[in-house]
Structures are given as structure tokens and as C-alpha cells.
Amino acid sequence: MAQISFPNIKISRDFHKILEKALDGYLPSKKEATVVLDRSEKELSSLLLVAGQIRDQEKGKTLTYSKKVFIPLTNMCRDRCGYCTFVKSPKEKESHYLTPDQVLDIALAGYKQGCKEVLFSLGDHPEWRHREAKEWLEHLGYSSTPEYVMAMSAMVLDETGLLPHTNAGILSRDELLGLRETNVSMGIMLENVSVRLLNRGGPHFGCDSKEPSLRLNVLREAGKLGIPMTTGILIGIGETPEERLESLLAIKGIHEEYGNIQEVIIQNFRAKTKTRMYKKEEPSTVDMLRTLAMARLVLGGSMNIQAPPNLNSDACQTYILAGINDWGGVSPVTPDHINPEAPWPAIKQLSHLTEECGYNLRERLAIYPEFLCDDLSAFPPALRKAVAVKIQEVGYNVETGRDVL
Ligand code: SF4
């Protein structure tokens, strides 16, 4: 067993034992994770130290990011989350569905800047709430928003070779199957497993798509279909520390069963004007660090753990200390449409701040190397050529598709 000592930090025997076991690759049980959860502020530094070491043991001194172009296909949605500024109602002049020409123009701008990922991020089935959305889709010949995403991701893949990754909320098995033909991976934030957050006054009141069991089910169905998924939790929206831990454990459980979680995002809530939650206190950097380190312990060294660099830009370097190994998608072309007030750092700047902490910045694809099979014929036909090209562009081993670093 790994022997560790923390000079000048007094930590409990139980906690010490859990940290030692974690360094040996053992994932803490729920009971052990609860011990970690209850640690005092004084013991935080030992938790961070171990989380960073677990990351180093498995991932080395490399942090990754994906160079992407962001396509907000529609900002209408069937829901109204208490923190969301992205969503618009058809009555607001900024509400839109992007036309195929607009989609292609954005994708081509990304292609010209060397992007490799096209992120389709959009509201959840707006046609279930808004007559205008339904009519717009029917006018173009589509019966649902996911069907329109399928057509747009096929078009972008065909015209530009960019690799699509879709976040479209709750998707049925058939919708996942359809999108799988042209998407290298997909995403849905779990956010939190607490049904309490759906109560009146909560962030997800009246938001059917935020029912945790539905979101877990999408991750499970995707697992059965072999789709690599990005998921994560949103912290500071009114959940308790225990509910945060439960959420991480739920993600861990799905990954243990299906092996399809390619990345877990820990995202901090931001209080924004014109939302129901504009007065709510944002989570502190310490809260974020504690959650990141907890995620690293619970999910282990092999999981890809991401925190966005733009949502706490002054302190994002400290996330490296807490065990992250990825910065997520960064676009040199399009803003973060979900958080337009928080611009992404330039890639050069991201590289600099990563190197200042003693790590290298490495570009990755929208599908992580460990999810690239040796035989590219396992990909749907429409994706094979584009995946092969992007593997070469990003410098993965051409024979195996995996990273050589
Ligand atoms: S489901 Fe997504 S897009 Fe819709 S309101 Fe909630 S956060 Fe906004």
C-alpha cells in the first residue's frame, strides 16, 4: 500500500487510510466517500494533494482540450431552468432555429480555423412546448428537433469533416441510434440526482427534462448502444454535499456497468441577471476544489475530469491542483453560447496557464483516445473517413487511433 505523510497537517486515521488506498487505485465505497465529504477545511490540502497525485499517476503531466466550433441550433426549449440565460421564448426576438445555410457557414468558419469538433448544443424538444417551433420544423420537413440535428450533423460531417458531438437533452433510444450514425460522442449533464431540486422554488421547478431518472436513463441507453458520453454535475444550485456525492456515485455506477462515460464535467453555477436565481450565491473556489478532488477520488485516475476554464477564470489554474485532466471544448471562432458573459481563454493563454503549473496542453478529439477502437470499421460508415483524418491531424497513433503520449 502507498505510504503517505502530510507534515504539519493533522488528519484523522480513517481519512488517512482512505487516501492511501485511493493512491493504490482503490475507489472509495459510499461510506468511505462520506468520510471524505465530512473533512474540515484544514484537511482540504491533503485531499487536493492526493487527487492531483492520482491524476498524475494515470494521466501524466498532460491536460487536454478540444478545439471546437459551437452551433446553438435552437435556443428554444421545453423547459425554463432557474439559472439559464440561453433559453428564449418564440416571442423574444433572439429566439431562433438556425437554418442549414447558417449551420454550414458556422461550421466552415470553424473548419478554416482548424477546429476538429462541431458541438451542437440546443434546447430540449422545443416543439413539445411551442407551436412556432413545431411549425418551423414542419416547414423544413422535420418532425422533431433531434431529427433536425441528425440532418445537420450529417451535413456538417459530409461538407467539412468536423466530428459532431450533440447535447440535445433527453433522447429516446431511436434518437440516440439516429445520432450515433454521425456523432462520435454525445453529452447530457446529469446536473444532480436530487428530485428535491424540481420542487417549487427549486432550480428545476417545472422542468420535465431535469427529472434525474430520465437523464440517467439516457446515459444508460447510450451505454447499451456503445455511445461514448460526456456528463457531469452542476454545483451550487441548492443541492447538499451528500446529493453531490450521490450524483458522482450514480455516474460511477453507470460507467461500471456500461463503460461509456468518457468524461465528467464539474461545472460551477453562475448567478446571472434575468434569471430566477440571479441573487443566489455562487459556489466558492474552495467548494469547487473540494468537489473536483472528491470526483477524482470517487471516479478514479482513469476517468477524464473536466472543469470549464472560463467560469472562474481567475482561479482556474487551481483546478489543476485538484486533479482535473481536461479543460473541455474551447472555440477560437464562436462564443460560449451558454455563458456568453464568460469568454473562453485563447488557446495560447490556456497553454500558458497550464504550463505555469508544470503541465502540457494537448489537443484531443470529441471522442477520447481510449474510446477509439483499433479497428475504425467499427465506426458507422459516415464517420470512418473523418475520424481517420482527424486522428492524423491531432497526432494520435495512426495504427491504433490511440494517443501516443
Ligand atoms: S433544459 Fe437546458 S436549455 Fe432548457 S432551460 Fe434548462 S438549461 Fe436552458
Image (cartoon, grey):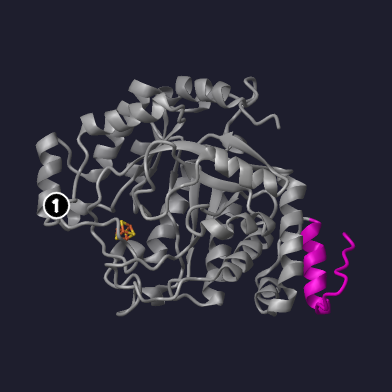
Ligand 1, what quadrant? Answer: bottom left
Q: Which residues are magenta?
A: 1-24
Query: Residue drawn at (41%, 53%), measured in percent from left and top?
Result: 218
Residue bearing the label numbered 1: 93
x, y percent for residue 343: 42, 49
x, y percent for residue 384: 47, 22
What's the amino acid at mark 1?
Lys
In magenta segment, residue 13:
yes
Quadrant occupied by the N terminus: bottom right
100 lies left or right of 160: left
243 lies left or right of 90: right
Please tell me which residue lies in front, 294 or 379.
294
Please tell me which residue lies in front, 402 or 270.
270
Q: Is residue 261 visible?
A: no
Query: Residue drawn at (65%, 54%), measured in percent from left and top?
Result: 320
12 lies left or right of 189: right
Q: Is residue 116 visible?
A: yes
Quadrant occupied by the C terminus: top right
x, y percent for residue 268: 49, 63
Whether 189 is drawn above or below 34: the answer is above
